[in-house]
Image (tube, rainbow, N blue to C red):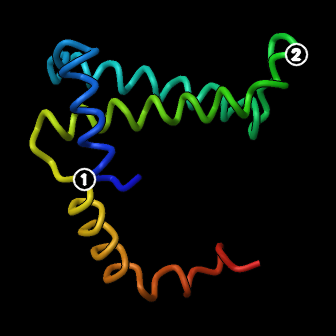
């Protein structure tokens, strides 16, 4: 699925099953909540925090994938609501980073093994 297709599919889902978009500020709050859920799992899977119950670790990777998908879904909602073409926006961001950081990361001793 391309980003363009994802934007189209999310819009179709919202306008049929979801009835309508939440307003932009509500979606911003939901996005923040979803990012927090990703952070909670990341801190337990890759950081020093532990799961409250050992069996929770067994499904954590699947849970992380689902939470990341939730972040993407809400971000796409916000893009659709505000008229942002995410394909174009991402390409512009990559172009900017490539131009700006062409030498920066290659010369960063902290990134060398």
Residue 71's spot in the image, x, y percent?
A: 43, 33
- Rendered image quadrant of residue 54: top right
Residue 75's spot in the image, x, y percent?
A: 31, 36
Residue 105's spot in the image, x, y percent?
A: 52, 79
Q: Which residue has dot 2 on it?
A: 55
Vertical comparison of 98 with 23: above or below? below
Vertical comparison of 73 with 18: above or below? below
Looking at this view, name the residue that lies furthest to the left. Answer: 83
* Secondary element at image label 1: helix
Q: Which mark is residue 86?
A: 1
* Secondary element at image label 2: helix
Label 1 Cα neighbours within 10 Å, binned few <14 / some 14-19 / many ≥20: some
Label 2 Cα neighbours within 10 Å, binned few <14 / some 14-19 / many ≥20: few
Looking at the image, tell me whether mark 1 or mark 2 is earlier in sequence order.
2
**C-alpha gap between disc 1 and disc 2:** 38 Å
Does residue 97 appear left or right of residue 79 in this picture?
right
Vertical comparison of 107 with 7: above or below? below
In depth, the one of 91 and 102 nearer the eye is 91
């Amino acid at each position: 699925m391309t980003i363009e297709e994802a934007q189209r599919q999310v819009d179709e889902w919202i306008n049929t099953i979801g009835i309508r978009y939440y307003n932009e500020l509500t979606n911003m709050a939901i996005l923040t909540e979803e990012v927090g859920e990703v952070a909670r799992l990341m801190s337990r899977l890759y950081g020093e925090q532990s799961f409250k119950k050992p069996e929770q670790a067994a499904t954590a990777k699947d849970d992380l994938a689902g939470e990341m998908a939730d972040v993407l879904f809400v971000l796409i909602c916000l893009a659709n609501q505000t008229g942002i073409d995410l394909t174009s926006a991402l390409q512009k961001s990559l172009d900017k980073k490539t131009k700006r950081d062409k030498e920066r990361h290659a010369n960063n001793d902290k990134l060398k093994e």
